[in-house]
Image (spheres, grey):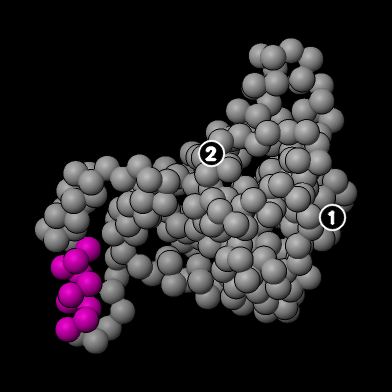
Amino acid sequence: MPDVTDDTASEPILTRDGPRAIIRLNRPRLLNRLQPSDLAALMALFDRVEADDGIRVLVLTGTGRAFCAGFDLGTIAERTASAADEQSAGSAFEVVADRLENLALPTICRLNGGVYGGATDLALACDFRIGVDICEMFMPAARLGLHYYKSGVSRYVSRLGVNAAKKLFLTAQKIDAAEMLRIGYLTEMVSAAELDREVDALAATLAGNAPMAMRGMKRTINEIAHGKLDEDAADQRQRDSMRGNEIKEGVAAYKEKRKPRF
């Protein structure tokens, strides 16, 4: 998955590589800063990916030297002309991040470079984050006088813990890749030369596992992380899995010492 350096800007691009879908943010000259139309495009692409049973894993990445510089601050400023517009600006980004977090299939954020502002939450909404060792991040909300939307704050706390969330939100300080790895923001930190190999390996692992079992466990994990577990539904998913075709194939593959075919 080589990085594209073409400066032609566009809304996010969806490509397919076998069971893997790749969504690439594509405004490299603006460090892939998101415009309102990009948010609508992402929502449509998420729907397409989730509706395709042949897609087992989604990779989200950026074009050029950064992953994403967040939401266009100029657009936010324009929308603060009225209370209704101010709410819609924040809500639109929140809806996209929440939708990404709750996608049924597993997701990987391929952090090809720096991640800033709202994009830090977009990456956190993915299940895994593999980043290059020169990447960096910062959340400038306090510096801008912005109270961040509640589900984004919740993701920071549930993924990184209270102390890290407070440091990142309240100081608005930039941190490097090593610190991102230390606090758990990065799942893996690799060199630029190793990035695609690591992403490919994780994507292949996820694509080869039982999709319905992963879907159910991802939902249960997310609900537990946010303190909103539907215990009855989680119990039902577990019971259903014991009667489903996936466990039959998994057990058969184990006995026959072969890879399962889900």
Label 2, label 1: how many angstroms apart (C-alpha)?
A: 34 Å
225 with respect to 14 (left or right)? left
Q: Which residues are magenta?
A: 246-255
Q: Residue at x 78, y 70 (%)?
A: 134
Residue indicated by mark 1:
6
Q: Quadrant of residue 178?
A: bottom right
Mark linked to residue 151: 2
The N terminus lies in quadrant: bottom right
User: Of tags 2 and 1, which is closer to the observer?
Assistant: 2
Instruction: List x then y, in percent, for residue 97.
Output: 57, 41
Mark linked to residue 210: none
Instruction: List x then y, in percent, for residue 44.
Output: 55, 35
- Please say if 88 is above or below 30: above
In this view of the protein, which residue sits in the foreground, 121 or 242?
A: 121
Tally of numbered discs: 2
Q: Quadrant of residue 132?
A: bottom right
In this view of the protein, which residue sits in the foreground, 176 or 172?
A: 172
**Identity of the residue furthest to the left in this view:** 243
Q: Residue at x 18, y 51 (%)?
A: 235
As helix, strand or loop, the secondary structure at mark 1 comes to loop
Amino acid, disc 1:
Asp
229 with respect to 147 (left or right)? left
Question: Residue 59: in sight, yes or no?
Answer: no
Q: Residue at x 78, y 55 (%)?
A: 173
Q: Are marks 2 and 1 in contact (CB under 8 Å)?
A: no
Instruction: List x then y, in percent, for residue 204.
Output: 47, 71
- Please say if 43 is above or below 8: above
